[in-house]
Image (cartoon, helix red, strand yellow):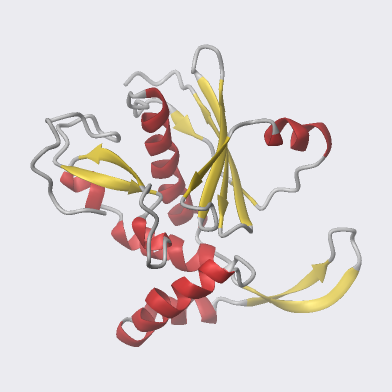
Amino acid sequence: MQSELSGCNQSECYLCGKPATTRDHIPPQGMFPKPRPDNLITVPACYNCNNGRSLDDEYFRVVVSAGSDDSPQSLNLLRQRIIPQMRERPGLILELMKSAVWVDINSPGGIYNGRGRALPFDRSRIQAVIDKVVRGLFFKHLGRRLSAGWLVDDFLYKPSVRGEFQNAILKLPLYDVGDGSVFSYRCHFSDSSDESFWFLMFYNDTSLFITQTSSSISS
């Protein structure tokens, strides 16, 4: 997130449509360890929408980086941001660690590899951040706000994508922030832009698949 800016030209907030006074980072700036890339994505936002979900942004950062299978960038973020925050505000980390459960671990081919601990997560808090990311990227690509009456579907976490569907996704343009080691994505818009598909990748490991569909709810 960024502090208030004087040169927003009163463009509309990408979430609520009110006059924008700040710019919001898509995805949250805290996902990127320093030095951050110079092509971070920002979109116009009002103060309330920009700052209203900062705790969810923090939760998202911890959960996604923890699930990234020790990628170099997630380890950098761990050293720079998460470990210092553990010392200052240990509540979130302790909450996650206490919620760990034992699960069966299977290889992609279905071979049983024993049991290990997994961290369940609050889907509603992750979905809240994903909703902002999709709406922000929609604004970036189409130059207009996805109205509140349109829905961002629930995400799929690390979906198994194979065959023709995988080939179709790989044919879509790839958009990298920086070198793509923290965040990259592919997307597709229908001819009428009433529907779009998003494949988001964090830390070259954690993937989320989302569809944005139109709704009959009037905006």
Residue most toward the left?
6
In the image, 56 versus 87, the foreground residue is: 87
Left or right, 11 with reference to 209: left
Residue at the spot x=65%, y=76% of the render?
101
Looking at the image, can residue 90 be seen?
no
Task: Give the image quarter of residue 92.
Answer: bottom left
x and y, in percent, of residue 102 in the image? 71, 77
Residue at the spot x=35%, y=18% of the render?
218
Residue at the spot x=79%, y=78% of the render?
115
x and y, in percent, of residue 203 in the image? 56, 60
Instruction: Tell me: residue 60, above or below residue 93.
Output: above
Q: Quadrant of the C terminus?
A: top left
Q: Quadrant of the N terminus?
A: bottom left
Left or right, 152 with reference to 117: left
Number of numbered discs: 0
Task: Give the image quarter of residue 42.
Answer: top left
x and y, in percent, of residue 111 in the image? 91, 66
Residue most toward the bottom?
87
Instruction: Tell me: residue 144, above or below residue 157.
Output: above
Instruction: Tell me: residue 212, above or below residue 185.
Output: above
x and y, in percent, of residue 148 in the image? 34, 29
Left or right, 51 with reference to 64: left
Residue at the spot x=59%, y=66% of the render?
67
Instruction: Tell me: residue 199, above or below residue 101.
Output: above
Looking at the image, can residue 104 be seen?
yes
Left or right, 111 with reference to 53: right
Residue most toward the top?
192
